[in-house]
Amino acid sequence: MTDDPVQQYMTGQFRPGHGALIAAFEREGDESLAAYCPELDVTYGQHPRERFDFYAVSGPWRGTLAYFHAGYWQSRDKAQFRFLAPHFLAHGLDVALVNYPLCPDVTLPVLLESTRRAVPVVLQHAASLGRGGERLVAAGHSAGGQIAAELAMADWAGPSPVAAIAALSGVFDLQPLLDTPLNERLGLDRPTAKAVSPLWRVRGGLPPALFAVGGGETPGFRDQTARMHQAWTAAGNKAEQLVVEGADHFTLLRDEALIDRIAALFG
């Protein structure tokens, strides 16, 4: 594996077809608005990006999924990932697609505080619809994978509201990003980067986790997933590692078997 973090976390992840794929994601997401009529931009805080879209399943309800988008904590939007909602609705799951403040408008620690505020509001919203309002599964992709892990490890007042997590192509050790242009907006130094790296703070008593990555991703991303899975299980927690062969960083989200595995976290 090359030691160049720019290649591992930026240029090596790029595929020529990603632009067209993201455009397809957005088209399918727009189609989901008409088909399922979700509640858009439900507020969970004062920042303009503290909003979530809520898709409610029309048939038998199995649980609530909160999904946190990719974008290296500095770009992208929940609207680009609305295409995922119908796949989870088909499994009887309500879906909250969560936006959060971005760097450098806020620091990464403040961003993570924001995502923690989202969880009880999503659950309150689910409860207002007659759903269970106590626990959810937190899922996220790339930066969202780190967010999901942080939510599982947060110091909640009382029992954790996070029943399980699905972290897809996550970055769990942010220290390699210090030597990339990504850090221009993140503004991390080495102590802060380690402090927001869940890999180094795994403990026992955490919820079950699914760590997934594409087999076509860079060794850096595959190594992040393998190390996080190992740390989770070494601490005595239940975890599964899934490598989706042939998938890259974004085609991973097209894998129906992965959707099935996330749905299986609900029991």
Image (cartoon, rainbow, N blue to C red):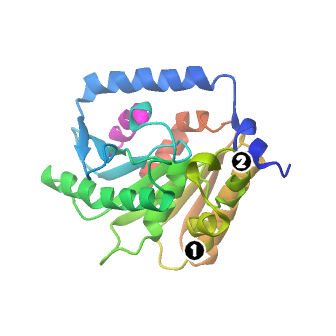
| Observer able to see residue 93 | no
The residue lying at 47 percent from left, 62 percent from top is 109
The type of residue carrying mark 1 is Arg
The residue lying at 51 percent from left, 37 percent from top is 256
Dot placed on the residue nearer the N-terminal end, 1 or 2: 2
Place of residue 216 in the rendered image (x, y in percent of width and height, measured from the top left): 72, 39
Tell me the crowding category of disc 2: few under 14, some 14 to 19, or many 20 or more residues within 10 angstroms, Cα based: some
Q: Considering the numbered disc 1 on the image, is that residue within a helix, a strand or a loop?
A: helix
Residue highlighted by disc 1: 201
Residue highlighted by disc 2: 180
| Image side of residue 97 versus residue 246, left or right | left
Can residue 26 be found in the magenta stretch?
Answer: no
| Image side of residue 176 versus residue 39, left or right | right
The Cα atoms of the two marked residues, 1 and 2, are separated by 23 Å
Q: Main secondary structure of the magenta part?
A: helix
Residue numbers of the magenta segment: 81-95
